[in-house]
Every structure is written in C-alpha cells, then in structure tokens.
Amino acid sequence: MSERLASVEFLGRLEAEGVAAIEAAASLNELDEVRIRYLGRSGQLAGVLSRIGEAPPEARPRIGAAANAAKQRLQEAHDARQAALERSEGGGREVADLTLPGRRVWSGGVHPITRVIDEICEIFRELGFSKVRGPEAETEWYNFQALNIPLEHPAADMWDTFYLADGILLRSHTSPVQARIMETHEPPVRVVVPGLCYRRDPFDPTHAPAFEQIEGLAVDEGIDFVEFRSTIDHFVHRFFGRQTRTRFRPAYFPFTEPSAEVDVSCHMCGGAGCSTCKGTGWIEIMGSGMVHPAVFEAVGYDPERYTGYAFGMGPARIAMARYRIPDIRLFYEGDVRFLEQFR
C-alpha cells in the first residue's frame, strides 16, 4: 500500500478524483468539506507527501514533482469553484445588494454653545483678555462674601444654591473667579472666565439648572465707565454685527456699582417689537457694572487706586439669539438631528 500511495499513478488518480469532487460541490460548505478531504493538513494529498520517503530513492523526485503539481491543480480548481459559488445567488453566503445607496459617514462637530463661547473669548482676547477657569465646587466666601454678598443679606437670595456640604456649594455664577484672580495677581488684570454654573432653576424654554456662563473682569488704574461701555459696544458689534444697537439699563448687583443690564436690539424684528423680544425691541444679554470698592477691599486691592468693570453673560441665550432657537432645552437634549445643523 505504501508503494501504491507514493506513486505518480496514484497521484494522477487522486488529482482527477479531487477536481471532480470540487467541481461537483453545490455550496460553499460542501466545497469546504472537499477542500479539507483533499488539501487539509490530514487530507489525502498530505498523506501522500508524508510517505514519499518510503518510495525508492530514484522515484522520489518524480513523485514529489507530481505531488506539487496535483496540489496546485486542486487549489486552482478550488479557487475557481469558490469564486463561481460566491457569484451565484444562493451560494451559501449572503450576497451584498450593490443597488443600495451608500451610507453617509457621520462625523462630529462643535456644539453651538461651545462655538459661541470660543468666539466670545476670541473677541476679548483681541482686546488683551486672558482666558482662565476656576473650580465648580466653591466656598461660601468666594461665591458670596468676597463679592460683597453677606450670607444674611437678602442679596444672597438672588441665587438658589446647591450645597454639597457645610460651607461648600456648586457655584451659582462664575464671579467667584474674580476674587480668586485678584487675590493672586496684581493689576492690571483682564480675564474672561467661561464655565458651568448651577442653580435650582426649572428646566424650561429659557432656564436650565446647569448652564454655561462667561465672566469678564478688567482692573487697572484709571479705568472708567466710558472704557467699559466702549468695550461692550465693540464686543456687540463684532459678535452680532455693526447694525446691532446696545442699551445700558440701571440695575443692581452687590459686586458692582453702578450696575447695568446690557440689551441688544432684537435680531428678529430689528427693534420694531415682536414676540421674541416681548414687544420691546430689545433682548438682554448680560449683567455688568463697575467693580464695587468692597470687592477690592476683600481681595486686598486699594479701592482708591484701582478701578475696574465686570460683566457676566449666558452663552446659551446668546446662541439662542444668534441661531434663532426658541427653546434652550434643544441645546441639551442631545438630539443629533438638531445639533448637526451647526457643524
């Protein structure tokens, strides 16, 4: 039997038998079974190759050449049959429908509020302001007292605060960073402070319990209200356009004196009055004012020598104005269909 297995004649019959079995395979699974039977590691051809050493020495070169030729022929027949079965419908494998339209590759983008924050910070960077950040978990001292808001004063009720522990809270505004910067830096100081704030506000079309805010602070010798107003006018014209008008309304904030609410002419009606601006022609964008002398004293600045101004704005509401979004909740719901409009 050894002599019969290790012979050119046997290899010829094995090749013919294997090619016939390959060509008769009706499915990819059946073809794989044939491949294993003839070309597998324990297949018939491997058995012949393992016994070439039992053949007479003078016959071994011819048997080896015939075995390699048989292996190549069987492999070629297998590859051709496999390709034919894959092309044919019902060949044992799901065939791709090339008539289907291609799927668009989804790519991310910058969130519209983040886009607004970056643009605002860039405008103030051109005016010499640096961007800084502060902790979101604050002490009562920085959140209230350093800003001229005694804990027992009614002004402290302007913010309904999330407390984490005794004396520790989630900051209700970014103004605490004013005090932190002034404690560690000598004038001149010009900074903008973007960051998250937290209040017990309802989640409605114009409020969110967690929201972005941008604080601004400028302190130096000789800063007056004229410089303050010209800075805000410059920002409004750069961000909203030269046609946008600004209005300063008297207001009250414990850490500024005098204080003002800053309004811009309504982007929807141009100031004529509509439902967006509630018929006034104006939309509020920030609170602001000249830094109160008590704040300077709390951080160790000489209020007789230094003056400054501060402002705080909500970029989400500014994004609503820019993109004409009626409900602030749309920014936070994570609906990709809405957000991908701003890519």
Image: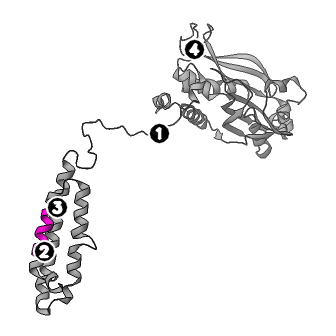
What residue does disc 4 label?
266
Query: Which one is earlier in the sequence, the residue at label 2 or at label 3?
Result: 3
The kind of residue on which mark 1 rests is: Gly
Residue drawn where x is 46% and y is 31% of the image = 340
- Tell me the quarter of the picture where residue 325 sits: top right
* CB contact under 8 Å: marks 3 and 4: no
| Element type at mark 2 | helix
> In x, y percent, where is residue 231?
64, 27
Q: Is residue 20 magenta?
A: yes
Callout in the foreground (3, 1): 3
Instruction: In the rendered structure, find residue 22 and report the number of the disc placed on it.
Output: 3
**Vertical side of 183 occupied by 273: above or below:** above
User: Which stretch appears magenta?
Assistant: 12-22
Q: Residues within 10 Å of mark 1 (few under 14, many from 20)?
A: few
What residue does disc 1 label?
108
Q: Residues within 10 Å of mark 2 (few under 14, many from 20)?
A: some
Instruction: In the rendered structure, find residue 69 and report the number of the disc placed on it.
Output: 2
Q: Marks 1 and 2, how far apart in space?
A: 55 Å
The kind of residue on which mark 3 rests is: Ile
The kind of residue on which mark 4 rests is: Cys
Query: Which one is earlier in the sequence, the residue at label 3 or at label 1?
Result: 3
* CB contact under 8 Å: marks 3 and 1: no
Q: Marks 3 and 4, how far apart in space?
A: 79 Å
Q: Marks 1 and 4, how far apart in space?
A: 31 Å
| Element type at mark 1 | loop
Q: Residues within 10 Å of mark 4 (few under 14, many from 20)?
A: many
Q: Is residue 302 visible?
A: no
Query: Nearest the camera: 108 or 245?
Result: 108
Residue drawn where x is 14% and y is 87% of the image = 60
